[in-house]
Each structure stands twice: as structure tokens, then as C-alpha cells.
Image: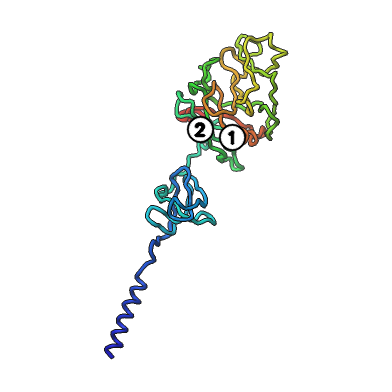
Amino acid sequence: MKKIVAVLVIFSVVFAGFHMTKPAHAATSKTKYVTASALNVRTGAGTKYKVVTTIKKNQSVKVTQTKGSWDKVTIGSKIGWASNKYLTTKKPATPKNLAAGLKTVGSNKQLILVTSNGYNTSTAVIRTFEKNSKGQWIPVLTTKGHIGKYGFTPASKMSEGGKKSPTGKYTIGTAFGRYGNPGTKLPYRKITSDDVWVDDSKSKLYNTWQSRKKTKSQWKSAENMNISAYNYGFVINYNTKRTPYKGSAIFFHVGSGYTLGCTDTSQTNVVRILKWLDPKKKPVIIQTPIKELNKY
């Protein structure tokens, strides 16, 4: 009888211990967010393993297991391991919709917003928005871009050759490019080797697109349009009254650095924006240091 009791006691202890012990490395399922601009997810917990997929900043993942500095994550139908150095449980803040509070765009349904951190920088952020059936501005694209070498300046202080971009709200003019229409609904003009934009303030053709051969006797200086920066772009309708010395040839075009007064971004983004723009939706472009956005 004593032997039977002893066996039962041992069995009970072992059985109880079995239920109290948790699997190694197990973790309660939780949601985490990526803090790196791009984070590789691998087949195992280490950099020697193959990459399954790459996830972007602020993307959410489900964490089901942890091994030291690595988390086992689930993204859609894919499962793998990611460094938890670049994961956080803190939910990222929802980006502020900068178009939502604007007061001067009530009749517009498409908006390009170009903002900088101040007047003396050539770096800008380009955002596009479209108004839905409820009158709400919906973000479409956010990307990096550039403005004039010496930043923004109020339109009242613009000058020819000043290498600054004008602040303000402007309508959008003709789209253009050195190649065929990429699919824009805007009026489109293909550039030829004969095309120039007159920047001679004393000319009657100041701030207009002209044929070099037909008008060369009517101006002393003009900008060649057949250049790579103008592979694709559109005219920003600035100084449409063609006031002398107030600036000319203000475009939205292809580029990767500061301009001489225009606004630029990558060719991919320029084409994407051109395809999106629709004259029926009365698109406009607002350019301003972000601290002065409340003026619009």
C-alpha cells in the first residue's frame, strides 16, 4: 500500500509540473510597429537567414514569439523573424491632414501642397489631396521635392533671376514634355528643339512659350525648353499678367536638387501627378513655408 501511495504522489507532482511549465520562448501575441524606414523579415532569428519580405516604417505586425533580440512576426500570409530593436508597441501618431483646415480651396477638388520648414531652404515636401463626395480632403501622395536654391519668397518680392520660388496659391497650366503625352488630362504640349520660354523682361513676349526661329529678333534672352528637367512637367500659372522683372518660367518639373525658381521631384512622381490631375476638378497648387499654411 505504501508503495502505491508513493507512486501516486510522484505522479501527481510530475503531472502538476507538466501543467505549470510554459513552452520555451513563448510570448503573448501582441501588435508592434516598425520604427526603421525598412526592416527585413527573415526565415530564422538571425541575419544569416534568408529574407522573406521587407516591411516599412509604421507598418503593424503580429508578434507571437521572442528569441532574444528577435521577434517572430506575422504580416498577412507571411511569417518570419525580425529584429525587435526596430519594433515598438507604441502606435505611431496618425499623420495630420494639412489640407483639412484650408479655407481658400472650397471650389477645388484637387490640391498639390508644397511646403518647406522655412524660407531659407530648398528642400520641400510635396503632398497631393483629392476631395471626396463628402467634401473631405483625402491624401493621395506624399513625397520629397525641391524649390528654388534660396528657398521661398512672397510673390510680391519675386524677381527675375532671384533663384527663389514664389509662395501663393496658383492654378495649373499646360502640361508639357519632351516625349508623348504620358496620360494626363491636362492640355499637353510636346517640346521640340525650337521651343524657348522668354525671360527677357523688356520683351513684349516676356514669360511666354515661343518658337525660337519665329521670335528670336523679339527678345535678348530665353530659356531652352528641350532639356532633361522638362522631360515632363506643367506650368504653374505664376505672373500671368507678365509683369516685367517679377519672374518667369515657373514650372513643376523633373529634378533631384534645388531649382532656379521652379518646384521639382522625381520623374516617376511627376508622371504620376500628371496622370492624376483632372482639369474638371479645378486643381490648384499652394506653395508656402508650413508655418504660414494658415494663410490659405
Residue at 39% from the left image edge and 66% from the top image edge = 23
Residue at 69% from the left image edge and 15% from the top image edge = 212
Mark 1 residue type? Asn
Q: Is residue 88 above or below residue 116?
A: below
Q: How far across and how far down the image is residue 72, in percent?
A: 45, 56
Circle number at residue 125? 2
Closest to the camera, between mark 1 and mark 2, is 1
Residue at 51% from the left image edge and 48% from the top image edge = 54
Q: How far across and how far down the image is residue 153, in percent?
A: 49, 21
> In the image as oriented, which residue stretches furthest toward the bottom?
1
Indicate the quadrant where residue 24 lies: bottom left
Mark 2 residue type? Val
Q: Is residue 17 visible?
A: yes
For the N terminus, which image quadrant?
bottom left
- Look at the numbered disc 2 and give the secondary structure of its residue: strand
> In the image as oriented, which residue stretches furthest toward the left?
2
**Local crowd size for mark 2, using a 10 Å CA cut-off: few (<14), some (14–19), many (≥20):** some
Q: CA distance from mark 1 to mark 2?
A: 12 Å
> In the image as oriented, which residue stretches furthest toward the front?
48
- Mark 1 vs mark 2: which is more N-terminal? 2
Disc tally is: 2
Q: How far across and how far down the image is residue 143, in percent?
A: 53, 35
Indicate the quadrant where residue 15 lies: bottom left
For label 1, the residue is: 269
Mark 1–mark 2 CB contact (< 8 Å)? no
Q: Is residue 244 above or below residue 35?
A: above
Circle number at residue 179? none
- Look at the numbered disc 1 and give the secondary structure of its residue: helix
On screen, residue 133 versus residue 75, left or right, reads: right
